[in-house]
Image (cartoon, grey):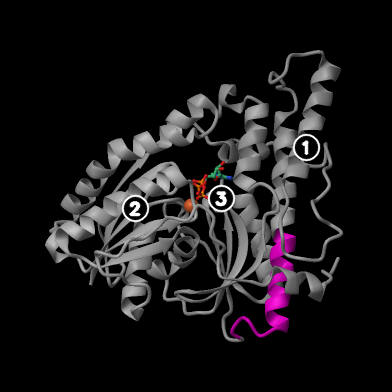
Amino acid sequence: RVVLGIETSCDDTGAAVVNEKGVILGEALHSQKEVHLRTGGIIPTVAQQLHRENIGLVVQEALERSGVDPSQLSAVATTVKPGMALSLAVGLEFSQSFVRKFSKPFIPIHHMEAHALTVRMLHPITFPFLVLLVSGGHSLLAVAQGVDDFVLLGHSLDEAPGDTLDKIARRLSLRKHPQCTTLSGGQAIELLAESGDRMRFPLTTPMGQTQDCCFSFAGLRNQVTMMIVKREAEEGIEQGTLLSCVNDIAAATQHTVAAHLAKRTHRAILFCKANGLLPSKSPTLVLSGGVASNQYIRKALTVITDMTGLHLLCPPAKFCTDNGVMIAWNGVERLREGKGILPPNVDVFYEPKAPLGMDMTAEVKAAAIRLPP
Ligand code: ATP
Ligand code: FE
C-alpha cells in the first residue's frame, strides 16, 4: 500500500508519498511563513493564492522523488478539516480532480487526528495513548483510542500557546534582536529565556481556580504586555525597544506556559487513570505540535510523566509541524482498517471548524480533580 498525502490547511503546502511500513518514499513542502511574517499575519486570500501557485509543483516533486507513478498509488489522502476555508479548498479541489483523473480512492483527513497519529509511523505504539498537541493554531489534550476514535479532554478557550509566544515576541520586536532575526517567536523566547531570570517578573499561571483540562493563554499575554508597557514607561523608551530585561521576560513567559501545560496534562493523566482511559501497562503521553520542540516545556512535562508513571514520546520537530507526511500516514492507517475510504467520484466538502473526537471536557470539569501542590 502506497498513499499520497496532501496538506494545505494553513500556510504550508505539503505532499508526501508514504508506504504501509511508514517509509517516506518522497516528500515536498512549500512554506509561506516568510510571506506572512512580512504582513504580520496570514491573509487568507494571499495564502490561497500561494497554495494555488505551488500545489501542482509540490505534489509533482513528492511523486518524482518517490519514484511512484500515480497509477501505482493505493489512494490519495488530503486534509479537509479543520483549517482555513480558502486554504483547505485548494488542496481538496486539487485532490478531487487528481483522484478522478487516475481513478484512485480518496481519503478525507482530519488535520488534528493526523498530528496525533504521526507518532505511530515512528514508534510501535498501540492505542490508547494520551496526546498533548501544542502549536501556533492549536492546543488540546485528547486520548487517541483508535484511528478514528478520539476523546477530547481539553482545548484552548482563547488562543494557542504558539500564537501567544509569537505575539509576545512581536510586541518585544524580537526579530530585531541580533540573536533572533531568523527565529520564530517561540524559538526566540526559548533562546533568550536560557539566560533569563524567571523569578524577576513573576506571572500568574492561568486558570488556577478551574479544575479542568482546558487552556487559556490570552490572559497571560495580557499580563506580559502590561509588564512590558510598565518597563518601557519606567525606562522612558519607545514601544518595542526594550532590551535590558527581555531575557527575564522571556524566561517568565516560557515558565508560565510550561507550568500551565504541565498542570493541565497532570490533571488529564489523573482523569484517565480514574476512568480507565489508559492502559495499565506502559501508558504513554505523546507531545506534538510546533511548541513541542521547546526543551523547557518538554522538561516540565517529563516531571509530570515521571511522577505519574507515564512514558513521554515526542516525535522529531520535523514531524511535529504541518507536512504532507502525516496526512499520507493517516491515509495508510485508514486504508489498513478500511475506514473513511471514498470512491473517486464522491463530492467531499471541507470543514473549517471540526471538533476532535468525543468531547469530554465537561466530564473532566465535573470530576474537579485536585492536583497535589
Ligand atoms: P497548526 O499546526 O496548528 O496549524 P502552526 O502551523 O502555526 O499551526 P506549527 O508549525 O506546528 O504550528 O508550529 C509553529 C508554532 O510553534 C509557532 O507559533 C512557533 O512560535 C512555535 N514554536 C516553534 N518552535 C518553538 C520553540 N522552540 N518553543 C516554543 N514555541 C515554538
Ligand atoms: Fe498543524
Q: Is mark 3 within 8 Å of ligand 1?
A: yes
Given residues 102 and 181, the one toward you in this image is: 102
Numbered disc in front, either 1 or 2: 2
Going from the N terminus, do you reach mark 2 or mark 3 first? 2
**SS for dot 1:** helix
Quarter occupied by residue 141: bottom right
Q: Residues within 10 Å of mark 3 (few under 14, many from 20)?
A: many
Q: Is residue 30 left or right of residue 286?
A: left
Which residue is disc 2 drawn over?
92
Dominant secondary structure of the residues highlighted in magenta in the image: helix
Asked whether residue 266 is drawn in magenta, I would say yes
Residue 76, relative to residue 125: is it above or below?
A: above
Determine the residue positioned at 63% across, 81% down. 277
Q: Where's residue 193, x and y in %? A: 67, 39
Q: Amino acid at mark 3?
A: Ser
The span shown in magenta is: 262-279
Q: CA distance from mark 2 to mark 3?
A: 23 Å
Q: Amino acid at mark 2?
A: Leu
Quarter occupied by residue 70: bottom left
Q: CA distance from mark 1 to mark 2?
A: 38 Å
Q: Residues within 10 Å of mark 1 (few under 14, many from 20)?
A: few
**SS for dot 2:** helix
Which residue is disc 3 drawn over?
135
Residue 277, relative to residue 142: is it above or below?
A: below
